[in-house]
């Protein structure tokens, strides 16, 4: 009896779009689980519902990985497809088996060569075309859907499957085809084979070197199944788990690692989808253990301890826990390892050693040349963000994503996009930032990185606060905080709180804003975070001045000013000068505002420049310097309209009305006339509103749009009302006509 190949690890070349109506479940699945269930079901909503109905309580909440066996994923769906395959003639079924064996779990592109080598008659494939189960192309067989492909493989006898793999192995004799040839030989094996397992290991390494991690995973896992050595099996499974993770198959990685005692990889998975504190402890312990064995490494081989320490750094950054940052820095010093600049820089900043922090972060930010290790490039981008260098952060994170794609490290792409979104927003590309964050959110959920998805939910809450989408801001912030707090994720929890605070500030709820921003001063896992506190300080000063309670705000500004003067970033110095103007008040504030705007002119944060002009314009109005106040407020209003920040624009209009300065801008407080150009539409709508508008115009229901954008139908309804108000229309029919006219 042949050992059957488990057909579950199908190639995931692209993530299926969530375009089908998702059935109601009570309680509803978490977004990450929902997306992975649909992915496991190959986009089929009926199969997804079947799978959801058989999941355990831990699988339903994302604590355990999804099952691997297709028969357990969707038995009814598979039974239907099996009946269709069995109804075909035997010759047709054998050809479909050969095509199916050639296509998964990895594509080997050998079907046509196998047909020619065996001199097979392909005319029986007409029956499959007549039944609409598959069709032939110049490149081979295309199945109707993945379930048909699975059924074509599973309905064959064990002997036929073995012969199909042997035939495919024989024709894969070209240069570079050894990994795929060995895969088929392994799939055709009757039982354990020390010799074949030994051949599969270097084949997996060869695939890994060229970035084919899905193939490497399949080879390493097959080697583990074939090796008779019980001590070798866990090592091979750990290697397969690492490849599965790199390829973006988080559920498979978690299933494989459960069969090993590899705490390093377990710590990495916890970092991406578990408790950040537990991840830090596991990764730091693994780094210490690997450092102790570094003497046994071959000359020139990379030291795993350095990589593990970098990951422990990320865990420390996620928690925002000063103790952990200090502990990691101390371990690096004791082991003689130069820590990643972000770790040393954060530890120094947390302790108030700002000059040391600047030097360490600048060194880390400088490591952003083209190519290179994606993780180091991400650290470079984080360091640049902490220094206020958003252009440098955008460059480093873009290169990190490109390098990850080139290396086949699918899992790293959304990590790079997490931080790129901030850089794009602050450098004046808010719509690109929002769209990029939404795509990264989907990728993070698909690849099993729920912690990264939480961070992106918080970032999207921040973008929604800045662009006036109050409903979305609250939904995203609540989703982020409810996930982050139990898992010790201080960074997204604090960022979500900042988003709510800015929403309060921009809508005149100054006391509520000040209270939230004051809470960001807390430290410890799941609470405040130094980086977010730093981001929030200028807004805290504004809220505190508005409420008349500036005692704590003055101390916060003093610390912020110390940092700004140390790193000498123009935008940070400008914001410090703005804080000084707010705290001074009266005529004394004017010179500080002028200093702030001079510094903004040398920086990149156009949104903050606009807020400085808004505050300066209001101060000038109160000093009865009407002409200059009007100029500043008009400039701020234009910037807010570019950013799609209606609440900030409303504040600017209110100041102008008091001045009588809305002449020539009549109707700014009223619904706009319908836009007539694509540029007008993209200027009037946020990135998310534009996506909702397009989907609605294409006929999607609110529930279908909500499924695609990972939002609630209630939020989509809110979005559509905002779209109608901004475009001056009243119905979907008008929206279809308008988008058709502008071809957006």
Image: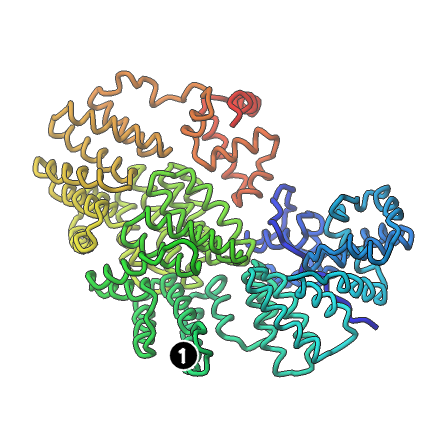
Residue at far right of view: 89
* Left or right, residue 160 beside residue 527: right
For the point 73% across and 78% down, the residue is 192
Please tell me whether residue 294 is drawn above or below residue 543 in the rendered image: below
For the point 32% across and 37% down, the residue is 507
Label 1 secondary element: helix
| Coordinates of residue 649 in the picture (x, y in percent) | 31, 30
* Left or right, residue 156 beside residue 459: right
Residue 454: image quadrant is: bottom left
Which residue is the site of mark 1?
291
| Coordinates of residue 353 in the picture (x, y in percent) | 20, 64
Q: Nearer the viewer, residue 255 or 218?
A: 218
For the point 14% across and 41% down, the residue is 581
| Coordinates of residue 410 in the picture (x, y in percent) | 53, 56
Can residue 455 be seen?
no
Residue at far left of view: 588
* Left or right, residue 549 beside residue 507: left
* Left or right, residue 122 beside residue 145: right
Please tell me whether residue 259 is drawn above or below residue 715 in the rendered image: below
Residue 368: image quadrant is: bottom left
Residue 722: image quadrant is: top left
Please tell me whether residue 308 is drawn above or below residue 720 in the rendered image: below
């Amino acid at each position: 009896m042949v050992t059957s190949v488990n057909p579950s690890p199908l190639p995931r070349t692209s993530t299926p779009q969530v375009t089908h109506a998702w059935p109601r479940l009570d309680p509803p699945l978490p977004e990450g689980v929902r997306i992975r269930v649909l992915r496991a079901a190959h986009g089929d909503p009926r199969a997804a519902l079947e799978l959801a109905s058989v999941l355990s309580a831990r699988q339903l909440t994302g604590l355990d990985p999804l099952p691997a066996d297709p028969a357990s994923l969707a038995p009814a769906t598979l039974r239907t497809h099996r009946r269709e395959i069995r109804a075909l003639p035997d010759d047709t079924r054998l050809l479909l088996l050969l095509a199916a064996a050639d296509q998964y779990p990895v594509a080997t592109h050998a079907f046509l060569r196998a047909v020619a080598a065996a001199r097979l008659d392909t005319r029986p494939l007409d029956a499959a075309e007549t039944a609409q189960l598959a069709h032939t192309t110049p490149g081979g067989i295309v199945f109707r859907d993945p379930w048909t492909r699975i059924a074509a493989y599973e309905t064959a006898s064990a002997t036929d499957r073995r012969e199909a793999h042997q035939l495919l192995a024989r024709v894969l004799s070209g240069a570079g085809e050894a990994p795929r040839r060995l895969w088929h030989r392994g799939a055709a094996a009757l039982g354990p084979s020390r010799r074949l397992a030994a051949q599969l290991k270097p084949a997996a390494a060869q695939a890994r070197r060229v970035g084919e991690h899905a193939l490497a995973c399949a080879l390493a896992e097959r080697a583990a199944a074939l090796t008779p050595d019980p001590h070798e099996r866990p090592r091979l499974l750990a290697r397969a788990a690492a490849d599965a993770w790199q390829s973006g198959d988080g559920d498979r990685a978690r299933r494989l690692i459960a069969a090993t005692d590899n705490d390093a990889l377990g710590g990495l998975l916890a970092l991406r989808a578990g408790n950040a504190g537990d991840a830090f402890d596991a990764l730091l312990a693994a780094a210490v253990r690997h450092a102790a064995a570094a003497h046994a490494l071959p000359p020139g081989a990379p030291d795993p301890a350095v990589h593990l320490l970098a990951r422990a750094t990320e865990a420390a950054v996620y928690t925002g826990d000063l103790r952990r940052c200090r502990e990691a820095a101390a371990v690096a010093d004791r082991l003689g390892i130069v820590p990643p600049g972000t770790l040393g820089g954060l530890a120094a900043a947390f302790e108030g050693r700002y000059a040391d922090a600047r030097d360490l972060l600048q060194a880390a930010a400088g490591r952003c040349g083209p190519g290179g290790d994606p993780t180091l490039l991400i650290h470079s981008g984080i360091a640049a963000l902490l220094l206020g260098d958003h252009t440098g952060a955008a460059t480093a994170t873009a290169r990190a994503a490109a390098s990850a794609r080139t290396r086949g490290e699918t899992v790293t792409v959304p990590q790079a996009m997490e931080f790129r979104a901030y850089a794009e927003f602050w450098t004046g590309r808010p719509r690109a930032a929002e769209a990029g964050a939404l795509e990264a959110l989907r990728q993070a959920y698909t690849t099993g990185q729920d912690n990264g998805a939480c961070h992106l939910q918080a970032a999207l809450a921040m973008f929604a606060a800045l662009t006036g989408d109050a409903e979305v801001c609250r939904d995203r912030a609540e989703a982020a905080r409810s996930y982050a707090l139990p898992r010790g994720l201080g960074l997204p929890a604090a960022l979500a709180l900042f988003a709510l605070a800015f929403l309060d500030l921009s809508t005149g709820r100054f006391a509520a804003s000040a209270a939230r921003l004051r809470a960001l001063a807390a430290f410890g896992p799941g609470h405040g975070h130094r980086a977010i506190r730093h981001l929030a300080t200028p807004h805290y000063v504004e809220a505190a001045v508005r409420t008349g309670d500036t005692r704590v705000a003055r101390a916060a500004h003093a610390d912020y000013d110390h940092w700004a003067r140390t790193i000498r970033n123009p935008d940070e110095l400008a914001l410090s000068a703005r804080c000084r103007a707010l705290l001074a008040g009266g005529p004394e504030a004017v010179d500080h505002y002028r200093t702030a705007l001079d510094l903004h002119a040398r920086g990149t944060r156009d949104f903050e420049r606009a807020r400085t002009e808004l505050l300066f314009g209001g101060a000038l109005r109160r000093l009865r310097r009407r002409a200059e106040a009007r100029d500043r407020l008009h400039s701020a209003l234009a910037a807010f309209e570019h950013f799609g920040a209606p609440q900030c624009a409303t504040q600017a209009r209110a100041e102008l009305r008091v001045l009588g300065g809305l002449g020539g801008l009549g109707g700014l407080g009223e619904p706009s006339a319908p836009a007539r150009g694509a540029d007008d539409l993209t200027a009037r709508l946020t990135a998310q509103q534009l996506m909702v508008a397009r989907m609605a115009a294409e006929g999607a229901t609110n529930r279908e749009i909500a499924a695609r954008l990972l939002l609630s139908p209630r939020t989509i309804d809110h979005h559509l009302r905002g779209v109608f108000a901004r475009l001056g229309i009243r119905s979907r029919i008008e929206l279809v006509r308008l988008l058709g006219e502008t071809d957006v």
